[in-house]
Amino acid sequence: MTISFTTRIDERFTECKTSNRAALVAFITAGDPDVETSLQIMHGLVASGADIIELGMPFTDPMADGPAIQASTLRALAKGHTMKMTLDMVCEFRKTDPKTPIVLMGYYNPIFIYGVEAFLTDAKKAGIDGLIIVDLPPETDDELCIPAMNHEINFIRLATPTTDEKRLPTVLQNTSGFVYYVSVAGITGTKKPDITKVDQAVQNIKAQTPLPVAVGFGVREKQQAFEIAQVADGVVVGSALVGAIEQSLDKNNAATEKTVASVTKIISDLRSGIEEAAQNA
């Protein structure tokens, strides 16, 4: 399917390329530890240097996620968080931030239950720019990918160390916005990426698509952001952020005065690594 629309994601990557730096993509789970704090964190991410926000859609069986993100999902669900609450949160965010791209990331089940057309209509109205649905392979593109594109919402695919040259064209076929390269095999947040292997993988992907390539899984430190920013178009951080949120909570899993700051500090550090990489380019 030919992509004939432009989203905030496209515009943001173009802006970053013009500035000769990688984009910083930040993941948090919607509604963790509560809606109000989650919204404050979203604004804090932008203020401290994030270019794109990924919002995890809470789901009871997050099979591709590591312990930190699984725990964040369970905290949100324990507070009664729903898909409608996620979309309402984005609507509220958009009242004061019309420019930052927002991607919803997660699993198909909550979208299926909501109803695909109803979800896509409401997501577009709320200000969602892209979707990353980890359990829908390219063979099921008619299920959600094509309908999302018809609503001018990017459908972003994951490529992994096990995505071989034969499989890659299929993965890329209807991808838009950017390609998310998973730098390590396995679940999120459990290993550190090997920058040499990441570099080669990014080159292989970019040889087959003009789309930006963002690299995530295992990114925690400024030095990692610095290294990845030299070989990729984007740096994705997730488990480190939701882990920091968890460590900032009180014994009842409620937010404290440290919660927002624990996340923004990490983003500031990673952004400084990306800026240094741009200066060295």
Image (cartoon, rainbow, N blue to C red):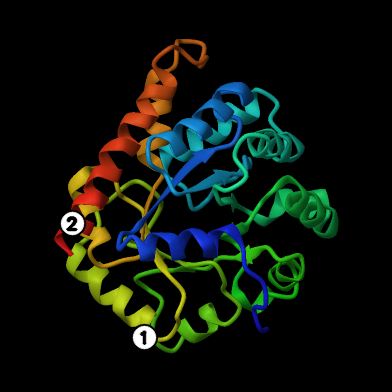
The amino acid type found where label 1 is placed reads Ala
Residue closer to the observer: 7 or 82: 7
Q: Residue furthest front?
A: 18
Q: Is residue 239 left or right of residue 72?
A: left
Q: Residue furthest left?
A: 280
User: For mark 1, what is the residue?
Assistant: 207
Q: Quadrant of residue 249?
A: top left
Front label number (2 vs 1): 2
Residue 209 in view: yes
Q: Secondary structure at mark 2?
A: helix
Quadrant placement of the C terminus: bottom left
Q: Is residue 155 left or right of residue 250?
A: right
User: For mark 2, what is the residue?
Assistant: 279
Residue 145 pos. (x, y %): 68, 70
Residue in the image at 38% along x and 35% along y: 48
Q: Is residue 139 left or right of residue 247?
A: right
